[in-house]
Amino acid sequence: MRLFSIIKTLFGVALAVLAFPPKPNAQDGGHAGAYLRAGVGVRPLGLGGAFVAVANDVTAGYWNPAGLAQLAEPQLAVMYSLLSLDRKYNYVAAAYPFARLGAVSVSWVNYQVGTIEGRDRAGAMTGEFSNGENAFLISCGKTLSSSFALGGTVKLLRHDLAQRSAAGLGYDLGVLFKPGEFLTLGAVRQNLHTQLRWNDPAKTKEKFSPLTRVGAQIKPRPFITLSADYEMMAPGKNKFHAGGEFFLSRFTGLRAGNDGGAMAFGASFFTPASRHSLSLDYALSRDRIDESLTHQFALVFKFNHSSPPPITNGATTPAAVPPQPRRAEPLPAEPAANQTDTVPPEIKIPAKTMLFVVQVIEVRPPFLIIGSEDFEGLQAGMPVRVYQSMLGKETGRYYGAGQTMDVSPRFAILQMNEAKQAEALQVGDKLLLKVE
């Protein structure tokens, strides 16, 4: 009965936090390195991305490097995501705690869109290209007192798009503070002095928008974790995250979270082996591109660690620092009647007009990478008008005109006539293309 009472209390608190979330915030797209804002690690993503003040495993190198100081054993994690539209999002990390230096971790974050067929204006094949982004993170976290830890991350960045590539460098800085027995506070500043330099003739530079995350963790019981984060980047781009975690036994954990308005769920299953342990983690969430269900899996190895901490109602041994990943915001309303400069005159659709409902995969003003299940009939060099997609094939807000560059069966590159037209769009936006 006592266990049942605890479970009811946990879910009562979780529902209070998760059932009334704030409105979903704007998508992460439209900014350099948007994939780095998606979050890593299946456990943190199952908590709705509320992990800044938790950060007590190998993924801390991404979420808050100060959290690495909490590690008591070497750890290795591998994450795989099942995504639609031939996209891949993967993560690998390893961490090792040193007695005097603190803990050090190395991580690799990879996001890519599969092989895309390139075509010229006549529709002839020009070869294949892909879009891939990679980040290599080197992180360190160290305890400075019994209640305070500091950490930093150096990021080596690489982006390959068709025949172009870019490389860059960036930095993160994080802190953890424990003001009380059951409360932990955390903060991290990401993308400090971070930018990419492209190998085009102009040596174009892409600056990453700095991002600040602040969070709090409460542990009312050793086997219960409640956490909340607030993420700040720019007006209209801020997010609220909340999550809860509950261990049913030494070998099974459940979690739920709210990621900026989108629900997420997760579970962990531990298998101790000799002095080591293996955890299989799973998370279920909504895809930020097409709102389909996303399944993410991870294997986490802990060496010289026989099993997860035992679940008791007593106090646990305190560590030097306390223990312990979006839907698009609704598009702007249509302009008022007197703002005729952004709304074209009524368009009469001839019989030969082709309509394509697409989703924005990436924004690189004045270019858009778009995806669709069917691009039959669309060819490179075709002029298009771009609208907000409503229900069915009804048009909403008018964004501007452009032309197709490269087209494959499921992906295309669209060049808008003006860069600001592309800047108004975000990853995940649904558009209607009219080819007349």
Image (cartoon, helix red, strand yellow):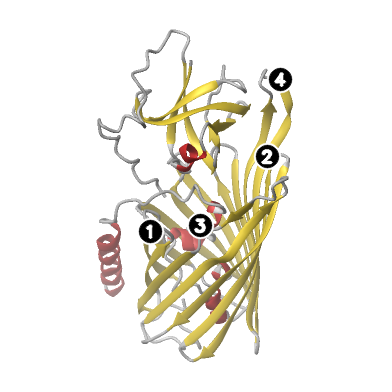
Badge 4 crowding class, 10 Å Cα cut-off, few under 14, some 14 to 19, many 20 or more, is: few
Query: Looking at the image, is mark 2 or mark 3 earlier in the sequence?
Result: 3
Please state the horizontal and vertical placement of residue 306, each as a whole percent of the image.
59, 77
Judging by the rendered image, the residue that carries numbered circle 2 is 130
Please state the horizontal and vertical placement of residue 320, each as a whole percent of the image.
51, 88
Badge 2 crowding class, 10 Å Cα cut-off, few under 14, some 14 to 19, many 20 or more, is: some
Query: Looking at the image, is mark 1 or mark 2 earlier in the sequence?
Result: 2
Asked if residue 214 is positioned above or below residue 335 in the image, the reply reads below
Which residue is painted at 59% across and 63% down in the image? 194
- Contact flag, marks 3 and 4 (Cβ < 8 Å): no
Query: Looking at the image, is mark 3 or mark 4 earlier in the sequence?
Result: 3
Judging by the rendered image, the residue that carries numbered circle 3 is 37
- Contact flag, marks 2 and 3 (Cβ < 8 Å): no
Q: Is residue 74 visible?
A: no
122 or 269, which is in the foreground?
122
Q: Is residue 208 left or right of residue 292?
A: right
Residues under labels 1 and 4: Cα distance? 44 Å
